[in-house]
Image: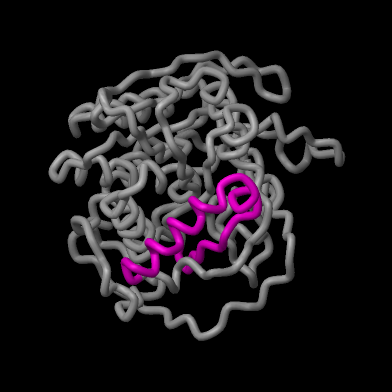
Amino acid sequence: MKHTYTLSISLPTLVGSALVALMCVACGHKSTAPAADTTDSVAAVGPAFSEDSAYHHIKVQCDFGPRTMNSEAHERCGQYIARELERLGCKVTLQRATFTRFDGLRMKGYNIIAETRPEATKRILICTHWDSRPWCDQDPDSTKWHTPVLAANDGASGVGVILELARLIKQDSLPYGVDFVCFDAEDVGQPQWEDQGGEDESDWCLGAQYWARHPHTGAIKYGILLDMVGGVGAHFYQEGYSQRYANDVVTRVWDAARSAGYGDFFPQEQGGYITDDHLPLNRVLGLPTIDIIPYYPTSEPAFGPTWHTSQDNLDNISTATLKAVGQTLVQLLYSQSDL
């Protein structure tokens, strides 16, 4: 996943983003992303997304430790996610598989599939990954390269948003089905010290590749991938492959962000081309799927300063970012009229 951020155009530096420090009393964590742009929220619909609920689920995942393949933390966390989705009214299936890492290591894992209204013939997919990267191979401190990433943002944040969306849908049902899929073995591509310039992108996103070859349903109209959706200072540009394969879905989501009052988080500008879980869904299955993933125009790497480092922890999770992404998805889900 995300081993490169290939830029298709030169993006201007973001300016004028007001940073607001908010203390969340319920969870004791900070939010430092821009506040909502309420001037755009005249057409807002749907229930209120709870960023504190999403944060709680992120914290629980992190409390297990890094969820690396073949580890106890991985198994305990997977059971937690499945139990929560089942408790929230979803039909849950564990799609088990054995994956082979680039170095030949065999890894037992599973995709977690959760369906609301499984009888519905019209469906939307919202997906993320739930495993942790085994190496902090982008850490400024090379002594940490062989330690696993806690993955508060790069893994746990997408799951946190999905679990809160499942709670809302249970309370306020939709006239169509929503499939939540948490992909395993996404972040196991070869580390940077192994890269000799011939890296194969198929080393990444193994769970998504498996699901694309063995989907649980053929009724899904389109998909939305969530990746690193809780970082401090995150902005979500329109990813290149998303525009290529599912531009109408990009338009739906970015329009929903504006309507919900979070247009500042979703600039109407193109980002880069990202190797991520949406690629096999588009290329193998032919399912139009977009990637909601941040781009930091002044950071190197462009995924942000915590990407694949030891700093991907709860201190660098922003409830304001979680709220922006979550409420945007609520806006989208509760305004669908043309599935």
Res. 83 visible in picture? no
Residue 291 at x, y percent in the picture: 53, 48
Instruction: Name the one closer to the observer, 294 or 212.
Output: 212
Instruction: Name the one closer to the observer, 106 or 253.
Output: 253
Instruction: Name the one closer to the observer, 16 or 232.
Output: 16
Compared with 198, 334 (above or below) is below
Residue 253 at x, y percent in the picture: 43, 57
Compared with 8, 111 (above or below) is above
Q: Residue at x 53, y 47 (%)?
A: 290
Left or right side of 107 for 179: left
The magenta segment: 232-261
Q: Residue at x 44, y 54 (%)?
A: 229
Residue 55 at x, y percent in the picture: 30, 52
**Dividing the picture into quarters, in which one does residue 314 lie?**
bottom left
Residue 25 at x, y percent in the picture: 19, 65
Res. 169 visible in picture? yes
| Image quarter (top left, top right, bottom left or bottom right) of the C terminus | top left
Q: Residue at x 15, y 45 (%)?
A: 172
Left or right side of 90 for 339: right
Identity of the residue furthest to the front in this view: 338
Q: Residue at x 51, y 37 (%)?
A: 132
| Image quarter (top left, top right, bottom left or bottom right) of the N terminus | top right
Instruction: Name the one closer to the observer, 4 or 311.
Output: 4
Q: Main secondary structure of the magenta part?
A: helix
